[in-house]
Amino acid sequence: MSLESVLTWLEHGDTNYVRSALINLTESDRKSLSPKVRGWLTRGNPTRVSSTHAALAVLATAGGWRQAMIALDHAFGLDSSFVDHAVAILQARAPSWLPHFVDALLEDEGDWNWRFARGLVRAHAVPEPDHPEYFRGTVRGLPDYFAKDRRPLIDQLDADPDLGGDHLLRMLSTEGTGRLLAYHDNFQESTDEYYPEHVPFPAGTWRVTLVALTQQGRLHRGSLLDAVLAAPLRDWAAADLGWYVGMHDALEPTVEELIERQSTYARLLTVEHGPSVKTAQREILRMLREPRFEPDLVLDASKATLGRSDKATVAAQLRLLDKLGKAHPDFDIADAVGIAADHPRADIRDQAAKLLGRLGEVEPAAEQPDPFAVPAPEPWPPPQLVEPVATPDELGEVLLGLMEEIDAIEMERAIDALLRFADERPQISDLLWARASQGEYYYDDPRIAPAVLARAWLASRKRFREEEWPIVLGSSAFPPQPAAPESFVGALGRRLTRIASAIRRGTHPSVALPQTTDGSLDADVLTKRLSALGRRQGPPELEVAVALLRVPPADRANVVLPSSLCKARVISRALASAPPSWDREVVSHQGLDREPERRIPIFRDSTGREGDALDGILARPRPERTLGAEVTYGEYDPRFEQTLALGATLLPHDPDVLAAHAHPPIPAPRSPQGPSSERPGSRRPGAVAHTQWSARVLSSDFGASGQGRPCPHRCARCTPRPGQVRRPRWRRVGPARRTAFAGRHRGRPAGEHRTR
């Protein structure tokens, strides 16, 4: 059959004629026509064939259920007649893949998909599926939302009488049905400002329809009531249970029906869903005076109800037990009431105590809470020796651990080993490469650093260029921009980027590994490391400068440097670094247009410089240039504390410089009239505690010797007021258990600091 002849009858206006022609296609015609008609729906239709006819043609020529699904996924403007024609075509073809096609229709959860699947079942083309969506989809698949005249839902159900009875009961027993029923009934019973003609129509709700079916005898009332009561007993979400409570009230069960199901109502007292518990309490009150009522069931279940934390449910249960005790005085309710005596709400405890008093029970003595006492600060653990990585295999394990959790000392061990083992490979190279390449990190996640370093170590040096290994540790929020190179966080990234470049060039000696876990390095140890350097490729100059910063300032002059390193600028800068000359200034900052203006103190070093990474690590002369970006660093990254910890290992003997760097990223309270808007413990879920280094950077307990040296700037959030409990206050400081950044306003620096 030629394409011209096919187009002649596909463009015909009578769909019945098109259906008959499609049913009479031969197998060879189907194979030749199938790619063309699928393309009309997926790639564009250059013909005058309607979308409905093209979808029918896809179903008539499909070679499998996946091809047949194109008709439902890409067609538009379908109506109820499409389902009748499509069912007739597939019933005539009777392909072997039809049951799989029905399952695929139900997986997509569309209204037309359910109607199509139901049409195939009604035509006996496929057996009734056991798919949950076949029953759950009845809620929205049966009603005709696009009909011009709104008809009662029971009339639409009459058009498919096989859906009554067991099908509706299974619909109510399927998880997820409850919220769909609630959406449907709320829409039918409410108005919509966008559809003025839409008025409340109770006859269109499932609740009214099910009650009408029971009244007509077409649906067993007892089975419907059992299905409604069973829903809260299943492990379903609360959103799936609210409709069943309303359905129960609409049924208005009689006392006889309650007595027959009193064990079920007693079990409802133990469920988590509050409205279901209240329904059970109300119905049990109706049964108290009945001769066949069994109080034991309620007493046993009341223990779970009285153990709830909410007030209304527990108070109602105490009133229920009071009435039960009066109606059945032979039953002891004191044990159950005693559970409420330990309730967190004082009024519930008083209610329980009064009830116990009427029962003649002695009120249990309330436990007096221990008086509040400020806990003593935990002493810092003594520093431990840092062991260098011994083999490339151990280095691979260290990098894998860093890609899971950043630790500042472990990062320094990795940097030291990467420089020494740059030309060697571990046995887990493939695993390490896959982990470093496939890891998905946000642009300000510090775990980017070990991933990039691992790739720089393992990648072929012929395929990749040196500039392809940048490491950026921080980023501003809006617009997202990498951390400024002259900022502290930017300088940390520049240092790690240089490490990656050095790894690409081959093996280097390493001299900057801290000697102990407090970040310190003795002058004699550094001199010994430098004296062991040969005439070949030396260590990166920035790493020598970092090593000098780890030596106590009084001992730096005792370090003996090789003549080849004495003239390097960064090394001379590290040796000549004098104590900063601090200037304090409070500047105004406003982020977005609608954000309130904030007053933020900054500390500048009038003798500082800006240039290379070392200048960014040391105090800067113009921090206000990057203030707007720095206050947003880590705004959406719960691991920003770990980034600060990486910087803390570089300046173990300069707490004043660290405090100056830490002030901009740690916001002050937004309102001068009250405490910070970021409550203690408000850190985002998933945020992890950083190492002790970040705590020491931001703690007033930090000092060169670790023995209680105060913050050099003496700001209010670093120095607690007399009698103030020192506790974490801001999100980024929250995990530091010994940190004390409290106070409503920032104070002024010490008198020896110049203040503007």
Image (cartoon, rainbow, N blue to C red):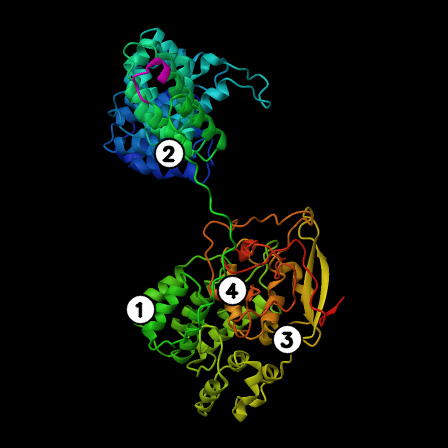
Looking at the rendering, the stretch of residues picked out in magenta corresponds to: 325-332
Question: Is disc 2 placed on a helix, strand or loop?
Answer: helix
**Mark closer to the chain start, 1 or 2:** 2
In the rendered image, which residue does mark 1 sit on?
A: 428
Residue 522 highlighted magenta (yes or no): no
Alpha carbon separation for disc pair 4 and 3: 26 Å
Q: Amino acid at mark 4?
A: Ser
In the rendered image, which residue does mark 2 sit on?
A: 108
Q: Amino acid at mark 1?
A: Ile
Q: Is residue 93 above or below residue 369?
A: above
Residue under the point 35% across and 30% down: 304
Residue under the point 38% across and 36% down: 70
Alpha carbon separation for disc pair 4 and 2: 50 Å
User: Disc 4 or disc 3, which is closer to the eye?
Assistant: 4
Quadrant location of the N terminus? top left
Q: Give whichever of 105, 273 is nearer the camera.
A: 273
**Mark closer to the chain start, 4 or 1:** 1
Q: Is residue 614 left or right of residue 298?
A: right
Where residue 382 sits: x, y (%)? 44, 72
Residue under the point 36% across and 72% down: 395
Alpha carbon separation for disc pair 3 and 1: 39 Å
Question: Is disc 4 placed on a helix, strand or loop?
Answer: helix
Q: Badges 4 and 3: C-beta atoms under 8 Å apart?
A: no
